[in-house]
């Protein structure tokens, strides 16, 4: 049953990482078996999911492979 449950609930995310210094973009597929959805400050589930997919986070101290610097990147979902 474990393999069946993993197959049913596996979520694939296509993430992007954009260097805010040189603007290089790296794409990566990420897998998960859970997702945290915040309904606070949203009208409904669709609004929450739309907000989650349209927002990006900034991460400091990321090593960019293109400009070879420690930079801030933008990480989001495609």
Image (tube, rainbow, N blue to C red):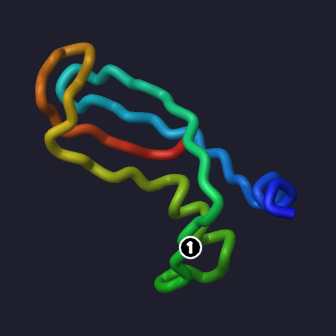
Front-lying residue, 60 or 56? 60
28 left or right of 5 in image: left
38 to 76, vertically: above or below: below
Quadrant of the image containing the N terminus:
bottom right
Snapshot quadrant of residue 78: top right
Residue shown at 56% from the left, 73% from the top: 37
13 left or right of 75 in image: right
Instruction: Write down the residue under mark 1.
Output: 37
Snapshot quadrant of residue 71: top left
Q: Position of residue 32 (x, y in %)?
A: 60, 54
67 to 5, vertically: above or below: above
Q: Position of residue 53 (x, y in %)?
A: 54, 54
Front-lying residue, 18 or 11? 11
Q: Considering the numbered disc 1 on the image, is that residue within a helix, a strand or a loop? A: loop
Front-lying residue, 26 or 53? 26
30 left or right of 58 in image: right
Residue shown at 38% from the left, 34% from the top: 17
Q: Position of residue 2 (x, y in %)?
A: 80, 61
């Amino acid at each position: 049953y474990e393999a069946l449950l993993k197959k049913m609930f596996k979520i694939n995310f296509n993430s992007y990482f954009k260097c805010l210094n040189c603007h290089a973009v790296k794409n990566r597929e990420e897998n998960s078996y859970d997702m945290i959805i915040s309904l606070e400050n949203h009208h409904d589930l669709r609004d929450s999911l739309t907000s989650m997919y349209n927002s990006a986070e900034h991460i400091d101290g990321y090593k960019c492979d293109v400009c070879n610097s420690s930079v801030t990147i933008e990480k989001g979902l495609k």
